[in-house]
Image: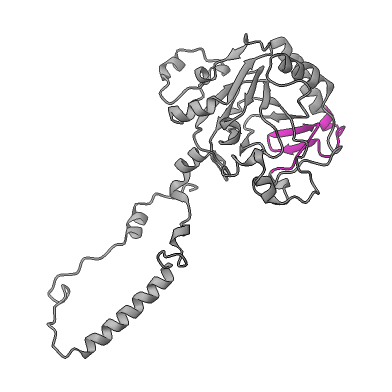
Amino acid sequence: MPDDKYDIDVLSVVKSQGYDKYKQKRRSHSRDDTVYVSHGSESEIKEVCTGIQQKQLFNDEECTKIEECINEVVRNGENNMYKEHTVDRAPLRVKYFFGEGYTYGKQMDQKGPGQERLYQKGVVDAIPSWINKLLVKPLEDAGMIKKKWVTSAVINDYYPGGCIVSHIDPVHIFERPIVSVSFFSTAALSFGCRFSFKPIRVSEPVVCLPIKRGVATSIRGYAADSITHCIRPQDIKQRRAVIILRRTYDDAPRQGEVIHHHTILNSDRNKNHSRNRSLGSTVNERNSANHKRPRHSEGNTPYNGGSLPKRRRSDADAKHRELKSKKSTKDDKPKKHHRSKSESGNSPEKHISIVEKSNQRRAKPFFM
């Protein structure tokens, strides 16, 4: 039976915008007293949190023992003791693949959801025995994962200011849940953020979930599949490592295999996720509604009774004006001449378009 002794009430640790700030001021000034504020609506926060489970599984002594093993992995990586694809280095973050590794980001031959691929078998090192003994076994005993379920273990080693951009773990590669355990320091897992670069900036999160040292976190459902998650650089204030435990599908695509993209998108496990390309639908509608490029809808094409494209409408207007001018030349009746305001001595009012008005009010560029 699962042990509920160390369960954490996720909703109780997630603080909304209405959280009383004076409570934060009254606390001691330790590093772990940072308040991570969520900016989503009450319904959004609740929807995300329903797919999150947390347990304080590891005490200080157990954390110290696991952290020594992580440091040993780091030393082995620096001494080139691992296979080629086991270690992936990035500024302020190093990733270690064990059991299974996969392509992502710039490593992908083709960009976009569903294009991620597992590496060929044998190109990354096996899962270390200490991970199975010190992490997997306690997680199995706590009921967070099934026995012999884990096939992939990834260690992300972050240094102050390190981050990982918003993403959804490839749904055609990994089963749910996604389980992780945090070490060395307290940080936060943020949901529904948008990143921009040069310089790097991150929007306010829908949910900002604090994760303390020794806490195991499991995400599934809406939290794993319908909204992105990330690690923000401002939330890594000192070194932090996380060990991510997952199970790969037996038929997950691998590098070198020719698999049609539509086959992946139409698979049963991906039907609910193909519509979520970069953010969850709720977040995407809220944040990018005013930034979408205008497109003709299906009912607005010239082939099914809709209005004509803008170029054709302008041609029709030109023909209409030409016919009107010909008709006016046939009319011999003299027309009364109206003096313009400039002729009468009054200068005409200059017409300013809406675009010009907005440009006049526009602030200086952000990067200046």
Give the answer, above or below, for where 240 lies relative to 193. above
Give the answer, above or below, for where 233 lies relative to 331. above
Measured from the top left, where is residue 225 in percent x and y? 60, 35
Q: Place residue 224 in its image quadrant.
A: top right
Measured from the top left, where is residue 265 in percent x and y? 65, 46
Q: Place residue 232 in its image quadrant.
A: top right
Q: Which residues are magenta?
A: 76-104
Residue 131 visible to an observer of this rendering: yes
Q: Nearer the viewer, residue 303 or 175?
A: 303
Give the answer, above or below, for where 245 lies relative to 252. above
- Please give the name of the residue rendered at 85% of the width and 38% of the height, measured from the top-left corner: 121
Q: How is the image coloured?
A: one colour
- Does residue 367 appear to the left or right of 221 in the view shown? left
Q: Nearer the viewer, residue 174 or 65?
A: 174
- Does residue 38 appear to the left or right of 340 in the view shown? right
- Please give the name of the residue rendered at 35% of the width and 80% of the height, measured from the top-left corner: 319
- Does residue 232 appear to the left or right of 249 in the view shown? left
- Please give the name of the residue rendered at 53% of the width and 38% of the height, measured from the top-left corner: 280
Measured from the top left, where is residue 335 in percent x and y? 14, 84
Q: Place residue 127 in its image quadrant.
A: top right
Residue 228 visible to an observer of this rendering: no
Q: Is residue 83 magenta?
A: yes
